Image (cartoon, grey):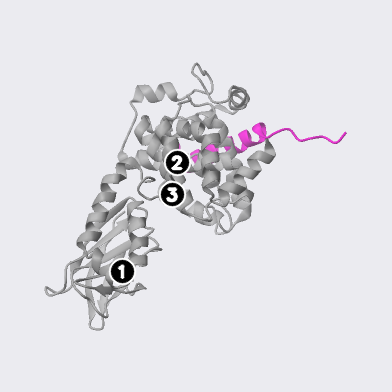
Amino acid sequence: MAQTDALLAEDFAARTRDGFARAYRQYGRLLYTVARNVLGEGTAAEDCVHETLLRLWQSPSAYRPERGALRAFLVSCVRNEAMTMLRRAGRRVAREERAERLAPVRAATFEVIDHVEVERLRTAVAGLPDDQRVALELAYFGNRTHVQVASDLGVPLGTIKSRIAAAMRRLATELAPPAVRPI
Amino acid sequence: MNDAAHLGDEAEIYALGALDPVERAAVEAHITTCSECAQRVAAAEAVAASLASALPAYEPPARLGNRIANIGRSPWTATPLWTRGLAAAAVLVIALLGWQNFILQGERGRTTVALATIVNSHFLHVMMTKGTPAAPNAKILYARDGAWLYVVVDRPAPGVHVLLGDAPGSDAGLLRSSGSVSTLFVPNAGRPNSVTLRDANGVVERAKLIY
């Protein structure tokens, strides 16, 4: 599987049409899910995923395998494009709808893409200090910029940046695959 | 960024998509030359991808797969749905500005690049402010992200330079006259805040670009 992912990343970086098609087959559902959750409706999410991949096709040096995993890179690109579209269009989900989406890690009653990964994530997020967890959830699941999170919580911007970054670093440690011990 | 050498907390916030566009562009520029920060961003992106797995899942429509499959095949079939109207408008603009003249005078390759770029972009436009009443009408089409711009003048304009940014500005080149119009496509415009047309006598006209 790891070799398959590495080969796919190589083909994607080389910008072969087959590489793009296979990347979409493997990650398309996740990418569409990311865009749909930010933008709230299907057509915009569809355009978001398409425009992101089109832009990557037109940018020969956008992705290099040594930069990191293709899956994470694509999710980041789609997420950033969706957030840009959200701000540009001034779309805002209703406050009550957003509130329902704020803590899906803690109470997932809907279909998710990877139940195993969600379970690990739930445990890791639950272990965060409350101030870090709230800032992270607002930023990610509330689709708020760090400036908006600071305003929402009435906390200085620098503090919010530190809390979000600390939460991300702690999750990176918690979610990292266990090191293989020599026998 | 906390200093000129490396990213600060922006690395993690970038991965969440929570930076504003200017900060985001700064991070993207930085990680193209700093492998240490690129790795830090990649680690944060892996966390963001895990967070994405907790989102309510949606099945993409089949037509999205068809659109992705068309990437690299044809600009028309690969164009986002909502930009097709813009694409049609862009083609019309090019046609009105003397498409046939471009071809006849050997500009096909350059114009094809410009056209393909415009068709695949979100773009804005602005009329230039004339320095004198006798100056020609001129318009700039420019990418919303500032990646490219296209200067179009409604008459031949020999010896007129296109300058990007505030005075004195960087020289993007001479306008190319073809038939009854002059144009210059600048593919790597670098998001200038203004464009000036200047000939040997001074400023011909100028425009502020707002993104």
Residue at 25% across, 64% down: B99
Of the two numbered discs 1 and 2 on the same chain, state the one appearing first in sequence: 2
Label 1 vs label 2, nearer the camera: 2
**The disc labelled 1 sits on which kind of residue?**
Leu
Q: Which chain contains the residue that carries disc 3?
A: B
Is B31 within the magenta? no
B18 with respect to B83 (left or right): right
Q: Is residue B193 visible?
A: no
Residue lying at the far top in this picture: please name it: A109
The quadrant where residue B167 appears: bottom left
Tell me where the magenta segment starts and ends, as one range.
A155-183
Q: Nearer the viewer, residue A64 or A97?
A: A64
Relative image position of residue B198 (x, y in whole percent): 26, 76
At 51% across and 19% down in the image, what residue appears?
A: A108
Label 1 lies in what chain? B
Q: What distance separates the C-alpha of mark 2 from that of mark 3?
A: 10 Å
Name the residue that disc number 3 marks: B73
Q: Amino acid at mark 3?
A: Arg
Label 3 Cα crowd, 10 Å radius (few <14 / some 14-19 / many 20+): few
The disc placed on residue B68 is: 2
Label 3 vs label 1, nearer the camera: 3
Residue A48 location, x and y as percent?
40, 40
Residue A18 visible? The answer is: yes
- Chain on which label 2 sits: B
Residue B162: x, y in percent? 30, 72
Q: Residue furthest left?
A: B133
Q: Gap between marks 3 and 1, in whole Å?
A: 27 Å
Write down the quadrant of residue B132 in the picture: bottom left
The residue where tag 1 is placed is B184
Predominant SS of the magenta segment: helix
